[in-house]
Image (cartoon, rainbow, N blue to C red):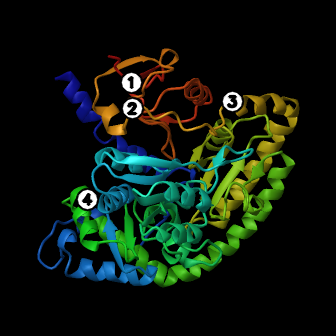
Amino acid sequence: MDRNFAEWKNMDRIYKELIALSESNMYPFHMPGHKRGKQDFVNPFEIDITEIDGFDNLHNASGILNEAMKNAARVYGADRSFFLVNGSTCGILAAIESVTKHGEKIIVARNCHKAVYHAIFLGELVPIYVVPDIIEGYSVSGGISSAKIDELLKNDKDIKAVFITSPTYDGVVSDVEAIANVVHKYGIPLIVDEAHGAHFKFSKEFPISALDLGADIVIQSLHKTLPSLTQTAILHIKSQYIDENSIETALNIFESSSPSYVFMASIDECIRYMQNEGQVKMVLFSKQLLEFRHNLSAVLKRGKFSLLDSEAIGLADIYSLDISKIIIGTFETNISGKELYDILVTEYDLQPEMSSENYVTLLTSIADTKEGFNKLEHAMADITEKYVKENAKACDDKSNNNLLAVRNINIPEIKCSIYSAMKSLKESIFIKDAIGRICAEFVYAYPPGIPIITPGEKISFEVAEMIYNFKRLQIGIEGLKDKKIQQIIVVKEG
C-alpha cells in the first residue's frame, strides 16, 4: 500500500521537471528544433483525437492527411512523402524492409544509427560494412567514399541496397550524388538517413538535400532541425527503383496504428511555416549563424579549442558540412569533451546536445536567438580564461589520454549473423574475460547510437579497451544490460 502511494505521489514528476526546465535560464543547444520557443499552437489536449469522420486515416490516407503529404512532397521535390509519427527510426525500418528480402545482403555505413542494425536483425540480413575514416583531432567519423562502395558492389553482385547517413550527427556530409551514381550503375537503390538535414531544402547556406542528388529514399527528422514536435519525421521517395506499395506495407507494420493527430498537425504546420514565414527566418538565421561561427572561431583559438569548419572539407571523404552543427574540439586542451559539456551546463546554463571524448556537439536551428549565440560565445571566452590558460602545461598529457579512446578501430571479426547471436544461448561475463568470445548484445556509443560492436562479432582487446575508456571518460554507453558497464552478454560456448 505504501509503495503504491509513493508511486502515485511521483506520477507528476516528469511534468513538474519539464515545467521547471521551461522556467529556468537553461539555453537549449539541442534538439528539438523549436528550442522550446513559443509556438502558435493550442493546448494539445484540445486537439488530440483518433480517426473520426472528416480527419482521414494515416494508414489509408485519402483526405486531409493525403493532401498534407502531397504538399510535403511538392515542397521537398519528392515523388511521394509519408508522415512518420514514430520518428526516423520507423522510416529506417520501413525503408530497409521494403527493398530487401529475408537473408539478403545490404551495404551499410558502419556509423549508421542503431535502427539500421535492428532492421538487419529483423530481416536476418547480411550487412556489408563501409567504414568512414576518422577526422584527426576530433574522433568524428568522416564521409563515405563512393569508391569504396563501388569496389564492394563490383565484388559482390548479390547486394540489394546501400544505406548511408548524411549528414551525420556531427554535420558531416558525403558526396551523395557520386554515391547515387555508383549505386544506380548496379541497378539497386540508395537509402539516405538525412534525419539531421530536414532544413537543407530551405537555404543555400546548407548542403543540397540527398533527395535532389539521386537518393531513392530519404528519411528526415523534422523535429531535429525544424520547429516541429519531438518524434515527428518524414520519408520521401524519388526513384524508379522503389515500389511505393512495399513502402506503405512496411509502414503499416512499423508505424503506430493510432498515430497522433497532434504530431501530424505539427508536421503539416512545420512544413507550411517553412513554405512561408520560415523562408525569411531562415535567411536571418543563416546570416546570424555565419557571423556567430566566425566570432566563435576566433574565441576558441585563444584557448586551443577548435571548431570543425570548412578546412575539414576534402579530408576523410567529407564533401560538405552542415554549419548548423557546432562541433567544439578539445583535443589540444587540458579538458575533455565531457568536462567541457559539464562546465557549460553547470556554470553557464547552456545545454549541449552531446559530448564525446574530444569534442562537444551543439545543435542550432532557426529558433535560436542572437542572445543565445552571444551567451555561448561569452561562455567559451570565459572558460578559456578560467580553465585552459591556467593549466596549459596539462594539455599534452590529456591529449595522450584521449588518444586511447579514439573510435578509429577496425570492424570486429564477424563470427555469425546478428540474428543468430541474439537468438543463441547466452551468458553474462566480465568484459575483461570476454576477449575472444562472440558478442550477443549491441554496445553503442550514445548519442548518436553508433555501435562499438554488434551481436555476432568477436570481442577483441581493442573493443574491450574502447568500452573501458568510454566509461572512464563518462562517454555514453548503451546496449549493455549491465548498467555498471562491468559485464557483457556473449554467446554461450558449446
Measured as percent of width and height from the top left, residue 381 is found at 79, 49
Q: Residue at x 31, y 34 (%)?
A: 420
Mark 1 near mark 2, Cβ–Cβ under 8 Å? yes
Give the quarter of the figure containing the N terminus.
Answer: top left
x, y percent for residue 321: 65, 63
Q: Earlier in the sequence, mark 1 or mark 4?
A: 4
User: Which residue is tagged 3?
Assistant: 404
Secondary structure beneath disc 3?
loop
SS label for mark 2: loop
Say what amino acid the circle numbered 3 marks.
Leu
The residue pinned by badge 4 equals: 255
- At label 3, counting other C-alpha atoms closer than 10 Å, the crowd grade (few under 14, some 14-19, many 20 or more) is some
Name the kind of residue labelled 1 in the image. Answer: Ile
Callout 3–callout 1 Cβ contact below 8 Å:
no
Residue pointed to by mark 2: 441
Q: Is residue 493 above or below residue 13?
A: above
Give how far apart the Cα atoms at labels 1 and 2 are.
6 Å
Quadrant for the C terminus, please.
top left
Residue kind at label 2, given as amino acid type? Glu
Side (left or right) of 403 relative to 122? right
Q: Distance of mark 4 from mark 3, alpha carbons? A: 41 Å
C-alpha span from label 3 to label 1: 24 Å
Question: Which comes before the other along the chain, label 1 or label 2?
Answer: 2
Name above or below for residue 93 compared with residue 271: above
Location of residue 219 in the rendering, given as x and y in whole percent from the top left corner: 42, 65
Compare marks 3 and 2 and give the one earlier in the sequence.
Answer: 3
Q: Which mark is residue 489?
A: 1
Element at label 4: loop
How far apart marks 3 and 2 lie (CA) works out to 23 Å
